[in-house]
Image (cartoon, rainbow, N blue to C red):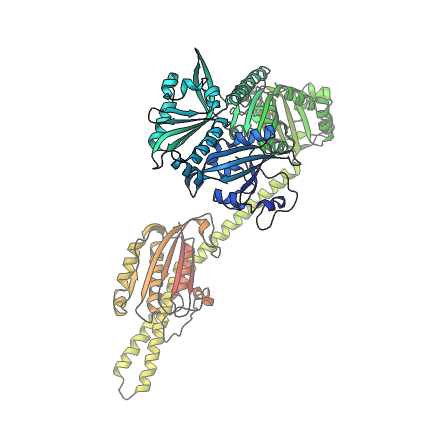
Amino acid sequence: MSQTQPQDTPGLDNPVTGQHPQYELLMHLPVAVAVFRGPDYVIEMANTRMLEIWDLTTADVLNRPLYDVHPVLREQGFSELMDKVIREKTPLVIPEVPVTLMRKGVEHTIYIKLTYEPLPVNEHNVPAVMALAVEITDEVLIRKHLEEKSFAIEQSQAAFEKAFRESPMGMAILIGEDFLIRSANELMVEKFWRRKPEEVIGKSLVEAFPELLGQKYPMLLKQVMDSGIRHREQESLAIIKNGNREERFYLDFEYAPVTDLNGLVIGVRVTAYDVTDRVRVRQITEEAEEHSRVAIEATGLGTFDWNLQTQEFKYSKRTAEIFGVPEGQELHHSDLVNRIHPEDLAIRNEAVRNAYNTGSLNYRVRLIWPDNSVHWIDVYGKITYDTNHTPVKMYGTALDISLERNYQRSLEESELRFRSLADFLPTFIWTSDSLGKVTYVNKAILEYSGLSQSGVSSGDWFEMVHPDDRKNGVRRLEIAIASGRDFYSELRFRNKDGEYRWYLARTVALKDEHNIIQNWIGTAADIHDQKLMAEELERRVNARTTELKLANEELIRTNQELEQFAYVSSHDLQEPLRKIQTFSDMLLKKLPANEPEMKLHLEKINSSASRMSVLITDLLNYSRVSKSDENFEALNLNVVLSNILNDFEVLIKQKDAEVRGNGLPIIRGIPIQINQLFYNLISNALKFAVERPVITISAQEILGVEVPANVPLPREKNYVVLNFADNGIGFDQVYASQIFTIFQRLNNRNQYSGTGIGLAICKKIAENHGGYIMATSAVNKGATFTVYLSR
């Protein structure tokens, strides 16, 4: 149930209690007081005593409908009592009434003395009721306990029975498993049961009403007796015999257990409210609505009923036909909206938004049926509101106006307007009938060709087409006319001076709603200058392509020569270095022990020659790895790692190193280069370790969109990411890009050997595999080298 805000606010609410100022005097009365306004019984005020009875706070109840706060009260008949007070504008006093409330999730039944007072309507004509309640639970329980022994309790019982008899609801007490009718008020006996008291009091329910044996009520009574749980229903159909005639009633009723002082269920309290008139009015209304729908659909209109709160959408068969919905197919409101042409959807949405404010809906849009045919509809509707002016339902009609719209469109596209527009344009424009016979050409064609309208109609326009284009153009036009497809071609047209110019010609078919060709419309745009420019550009591109091909061949020859030169140079340089090392070793062996200075010089010569040899080897490797034209193969990186570990077996044992790496993927790569990549990075990690080295190698596959923003790789590819992490000396992160530059070293050559080429080789290998390499580190915190390889 939607919340109803108070309609009358004469002043600001109390900042502490949140209550209206006019109710401040009532807040601390010893009597529970509450004010309910409007058809939803919105709680406009509840004083401290009433909040204690409800076991709630002001924030829990203020400005909320009563039955949103206490759903359990809905079936206890208070709505009818308050409606009676409002309708008759007279107070109502009930000396004793049982009330069941939910307190901390548990039902509690209390007894109160209840008074309802009608209040004046506010400025919005919304009536209100003030309820005053005094809890008498203790008194009632004491009275029940002492009813056989106390005259005072007998007097109270009499008062209770008086209230019982005069209650605006039908009430009865049924005792025992046979449901003996112990008591029933006048309303229950005469209005509901259509009996006299002596015909029912003291009898079992089935004895008094044998017609109930075929109905659900005896079973429900037994269910309440057995379980001790109350049962409620709304608009329940009951059939009671009145003489020989059956009468049908609709009741809102409650069966509540009656217990003794020990809490045992001994009977059932029945309360009922006759809602037959309300149900019959609704049924008559629904029947009238159905008759109206039938009458409306007889005119070709489709009807719909849209519940704006539950979004339930009901539509007639004709509405489904208008929207192109096959018979028997169940659709929701959104499915019908999706049939609206995308270009017209904004029109519909704006109309619905306006309807919420004005109450009226009116728009015209196109629909696209499942067969892609387009239909026009007019939609009209009205919105109904609740008492808070909240939209509740929209009722409306839909009318197919496709024929009318097509006729209107044909008028809008009249020949006169078309020709006026066509004559204004410099572009060639013409029309022809369904068989391709020209019926009109614009002034641009006549001025260009020097022909007359009659000459064009007689077929002279055909002579405008260049002889070399005529045969192919005519053939393609015939195919277009036969198939209904568009005609598109580049043709040369002759002007009145006998010169030809290139034109881009296009002809499209205009069809009716049955997809039948009515006529053709054609256009031609001058592309002569663009055509000549394209031909010149093509000539230049071909010439440039030939030049680039020759330059590429020359570059290939140069690279081959450089590669051969590098190989020969490295071989020729290695040979004298080997001799230097050999003769240095021979001199060291023959050198007397008393020549330490000479020995030092020879050792430096030998060391320099050794470094030179390693440098030449690394340079040769770098030149070789620069080539990326080798074949890619499937490589198991676990096998690659195992081979590298075999190469470093001795060094790993010497340094007591631990290399972790398994579950590596299979990739496509250049075998010798991937092997070199693993070799260089693991060698680097072992070299720069100052304690027991721990090297961890891991891998993962990522999508291009997952590549970090600082990695310059295309996002449309996917990648394998390899991480080589160690616990070595690390380096300052500011040098992270510098270390991949050839000959770049960050450490003392005497302390850590190397040429400064190894990481440069790794960078080349990553680039040859469409990837990238980067490093992250900190001084004495180890380093991690991350390699991206394209999948």
Q: In this view, does 589 lie to the left or right of 99?
A: left
Instruction: Tell me which corner region of the image, top left, top right, bottom left or bottom right, holds residue 397.
Output: top right
Q: Which of 727 and 261 is in front in this view?
A: 261
Is residue 361 at least partly visible in the picture? yes
Is residue 765 at least partly visible in the picture? no
**Residue 662: x %, y % from top left:** 30, 55
- Tell me: residue 204, above or below residue 543: above
Q: Nearer the viewer, residue 417 or 314?
A: 314
Outermost residue toward the front?
Answer: 151
Instruction: Tell me which corner region of the image, top left, top right, bottom left or bottom right, holds residue 505.
Output: top right
Q: Nearer the viewer, residue 68 or 758?
A: 68
**Residue 684: x %, y % from top left:** 35, 66
Count of marks, rendered view: 0
Residue name at image x 66 percent, y 43 percent: 10
Residue name at image x 35 percent, y 32 percent: 265
Q: Is residue 221 left or right of residue 479?
A: left
**Residue 494: x %, y % from top left:** 68, 29
Outermost residue toward the bottom?
Answer: 594
**Residue 185: x %, y % from top left:** 46, 25
- Tell me: residue 534, above or below residue 386: below
- Tell me: residue 501, above or below residue 672: above
Outermost residue toward the top?
Answer: 244
Q: Is residue 345 left or right of residue 765?
A: right
- Tell me: residue 711, above or below residue 685: above
